[in-house]
Amino acid sequence: MRACNCRPRPGQASTVTPISEDRPTDRVDRLATAAPSLSGAVPVNERAKGGGSAVAPPLENPTPPPVAPTSAAGFLDSILETKSELFRGSREVLRDSYIPSRLPHREQQIRAVAEVLAPALRGDVPSNLLLYGKIGTGKTAVVSQVVQDIQRRTELASHVAFVYVNCGNIDTPYSLLQNIANTFAKTESDRIPTGWSLDRVQAAMRRLMEANGGIVILVLDEIDRLVARSGDGVLYTLSQINTELELARMVLLGISNDLKFTHQLDARVRSRLNEEKILFPPYDALQLQDILRDRAKEAFRDGVVDPGVVERCAAYAALENGDARRALALLRLSAEMAERDRAKRITPDHVVKAKNRLEQDIILDCCRTLPPHCKVLLYAILQACERRRTGVLTGEVYDAYRRLAERLGLQPLHARSISNYVSELESLGLIRATIVSRGRGGRTREILVDVPISDTMPALEEDPLIAPVGRPHSRGQLLLTNFDNPGRTGPF
Ligand code: ADP
Ligand code: MG
């Protein structure tokens, strides 16, 4: 999901611009995100196997293969010494965390967001704002650009603070408020620990905001995921917080990938959040071509991208809801496929290979960007399914999760939150529930995993949270269900 212009680490609030030069590199993101961002990286286990083996023979291979280095260090050195024949400089230009200086086909939205936030320049409190549109339609990029532009006006620094939270990586209302409050903590003792009551966290957040004063523009990216998980109670709290503040004011800037998101909200929350709203329509193939051409010019040396490459990436992504993130990931992965072939140019055939690989990578990236407890739940389901070589009944899922959370030293979430996470994993296409008859006992639901266990467990074990219960990755692939079934439903 980023070394130059990077989003904040998932789940972390930040008082700096969502995307700026000095941000820590995130995987997701975005943001996230999350809304899972795409990474063209080869899955870990594929790398271990020597990733390129799945790739067809090179189309052109004029360069003799280098002598194989004998150690990891030698291998890394050889990579560093090899100057890419395709890339001009940093590959980060093709990552979705990179914010280009120009965002074609989003001029209208940039202007609209700037108009809503402009009163902050005069010290007035802007309206709350909701941006909505499908994933990859440039919402986070537009907000980042406008926020950066506003922040460049240094006179604002003293009275306007931007706080960015990617709600896709936040488990609970508590952790949301804790994250926001902690961005205002000036000393270690100001920071909010875990284990307080929600009321106490809210009071501490108000106190810290008052001490800071000024206008706080709170960007809640992927706000729809927060509401799907925890309801809109915390949004109600945030939307009426100004009535309890004297020296500070909060403005909510929600970003939703779900177009119908506001339908689920309580009428009061809806009307407060909806003071202004801006739609981000999907890009069509020609618009995606413009976006990709800009990036390709920045990323690649002259003449290395064959005719048809950009067009094909754009066409595939246009079919996937006009998702610019998908288009960029395809272009980046096509270049990686070409490099593995030791080709001097990227061809439309590389795009086809990239598309096949990307479908697999998206699933793993999606797993990597789940919030902590959701990861633990998925890992518990995978463990149970692997052990039993069958599905796991819904009644058993919570116990499996709770045991694992306790082993990892986490306070388990309530069964209701876990049941929401089960639905979320299902809607992401990672698991599937089928009704099974239990004779006289009636009917129950059986959870099956819809991803290859042998690839997914190592992806989750990369997280230090899960690592302590990780296992050796020597098993063969165990495919329990219809991962390869082209008819499967879900976002991928
Ligand atoms: P969203 O937040 O709507 O899911 P993002 O803003 O994260 O989408 O955009 C996904 C990727 O596509 C990012 O790398 C972003 O820089 C790029 N992108 C989106 N729209 C544009 C655009 N109009 N011009 C250039 N790049 C874009
Ligand atoms: Mg986004």
Image (cartoon, rainbow, N blue to C red):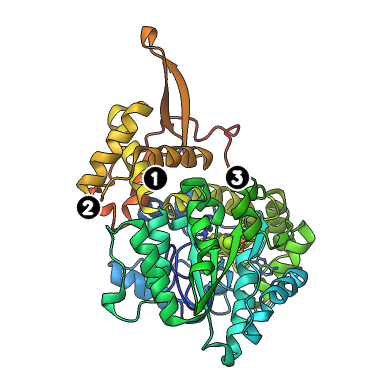
Where residue 307 appears, as percent x and y from the top left, is 74, 64
Q: Position of residue 484 (x, y in %)?
A: 52, 35
- The image quadrant that residue 93 belongs to is bottom right
Estimate how packed mark 3 is, as few (under 14), some (14 to 19) or many (20 or more) residues with alpha carbons within 10 Å: some
Mark 1–mark 2 distance (CA, rounded to whole Å) = 18 Å
Q: Residue at x 77, y 63 (%)?
A: 287
Find out if the beta carbon at label 3 lies less than 8 Å from the nearest ligand 2 atom. Answer: no
Foreground: 175 or 9? 175
Label 1, secondary structure: give it.
helix
Looking at the image, can residue 80 be seen?
yes
According to the picture, the residue beneath numbered tag 2 turns out to be 468
Q: Looking at this view, is 417 or 149 the one in front? A: 417
Q: Residue 84 vs residue 445: left or right?
A: right
Where is residue 279 drawn, in percent x and y? 72, 59
Query: Residue sitting at 55 percent across and 62 percent down?
Result: 239
Kindly report which numbered mark, 1 or 2, lies closer to the viewer in this rendering. 2
The quarter of the image holding the C terminus is top right
**Along the viewing direction, whichever of 205 and 394 lies nearer the viewer:** 205
From the image, tell me which residue sits under label 3: 264
What residue did someone put label 1 on? 455
In this rendering, the label closer to the viewer, 2 or 3:
3
Looking at the image, residue 40 lies above or below residue 472:
below
Residue at 47% across, 75% down: 3
Residue appearing at x 28%, y 35% in the figure: 400
Amino acid on which the number 1 mark rests in the picture: Asp
Which numbered disc flags the more N-terminal residue, 2 or 3? Answer: 3
Q: Indicate the amino acid at tag 3.
A: Gln
Between circles 1 and 3, the one closer to the viewer is 3
Tell me which corner region of the image, top left, top right, bottom left or bottom right, holds residue 132. Answer: bottom right
Q: Residue furthest bottom?
A: 155
Give the CA separation, mark 2 to mark 3. 38 Å
